[in-house]
Image (spheres, rainbow, N blue to C red):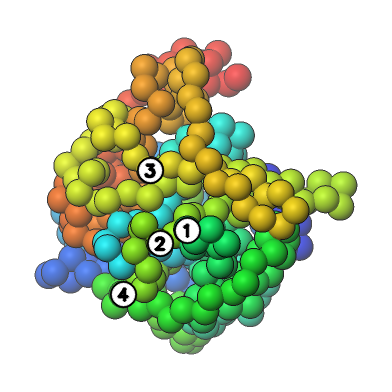
Amino acid sequence: MREFDNMSQEIYHFKVHKAEAELDGQCRMTVRLFYPKNPEPIDRRLPENLAFGVGVFEALERNYFANIADTDNPIKPASAGSLYVLKDGKIVCHRRDKFAPTHKLYHSAYAGYTQAPEFVYSANGLRQTGLKESAEECLLITTDASPWLVVPNDSKDYTLEAAKRLGLNLRPRFVDVEVFEPTDTLEVYYEDGEHIFTTRAFLEFIYESQTSLNALWLRRFPLSSNEIHPVDAEGMVKDGQFQHFNRESYVIDPSEVANISFGSILQRRPRVVQTRIESGIPRVYKPEYKEPYLGPDKVPVVHPHVWAPEDLLVRTLDALNVPGYAGKWREIELWKERSRLERRSLLPQEVLAA
């Protein structure tokens, strides 16, 4: 669902004023959060915090340790999500639309916010958030003439609920998925040191566009890319009706984006689809692009496919050991935050205030 701008009781987050990250010799990361005993829920994103973020990533690079939040620079409990990896190694992601509240027209994995205290205070709750948010944002259907809905057994209820909300009326094909072994550890305590929970995930945090922490899982489906179509299931409820955003869904071979820098043109036209739902049946089609083209942050560009992986996708490409990303998500995020901070320093004050 459209995130945070129209935040309601569906979202539960609060400020965390004590948090730290530590790297070991293999660059595996442990993040420790220290929750306040009496947290005050927040009803909006935490704003970007570029200067502090640059300092955090520089300290991690230099000392393998950094305080990622403090009294004046809070973070929030982790959001959660996942990336779909197909049997032939291709991945499924989406491109955020031009109306997205942050990272407009960036490519991203599927993730979202926790919805109640039970999701913030337990490992299973966080994991369920990742499964739920991924199912709400992306469904897979088979390429058969009469398609089936692919239903992962680890997110069965969430997937069937998302399909119903979208209006899909397809036969379910239940499948087991493999979860990649995560490299990172999230430890959560109260501020007095009392342990709350520990879990494993691929972790990342940012201070650009907003301040956030995410826990991600990689899930391999037992189907190849030629057997499925991704269906973007994201939307919002307005006046009691579900409005389908129908964002672009991408099926990408990681080799196609290996060593490609942010802002580069994808020379090999990627497989991109959108889907209309007509009387419960999905109609999959290729989007048409007309000039003027828009790229990341709605900047005019010369090609319809400008590569713009946001933090979630960069972290998962790192986890998949894709050349150009393997072991580099922190370096890439530091570059992004330094670059944005430098651009901000050159803008006139009246532009910054607008």
Helix, strand or loop at disc 3? strand
Residue 234: % across, % down? 62, 52
Q: Quadrant of residue 129?
A: bottom right
Please state which amino acid type lies under the numbered disc 3.
Answer: Arg
**Viewer-proximal residue among 160 and 185:** 160
The residue closer to the viewer here, 94 or 20, is: 94
Residue wearing tag 3: 271
> Is the residue under label 2 in contact with that under label 1 (CB below 8 Å)?
yes
Identified at 31% across, 75% down, the residue is: 180
Contact, mark 1 vs mark 4 (Cβ under 8 Å): no
Earlier sequence position, callout 1 versus callout 4: 1
Relative placement, left or right, of 61 versus 341 is left
Q: Looking at the image, is mark 1 or mark 4 nearer the viewer?
A: 1
User: What amino acid is at disc 4?
Assistant: Phe
Q: Position of residue 100 (x, y in %)?
A: 58, 39
Q: Which residue is mark 2?
A: 227
Give the SS element for disc 2.
helix
Q: Position of residue 78 (x, y in %)?
A: 49, 65
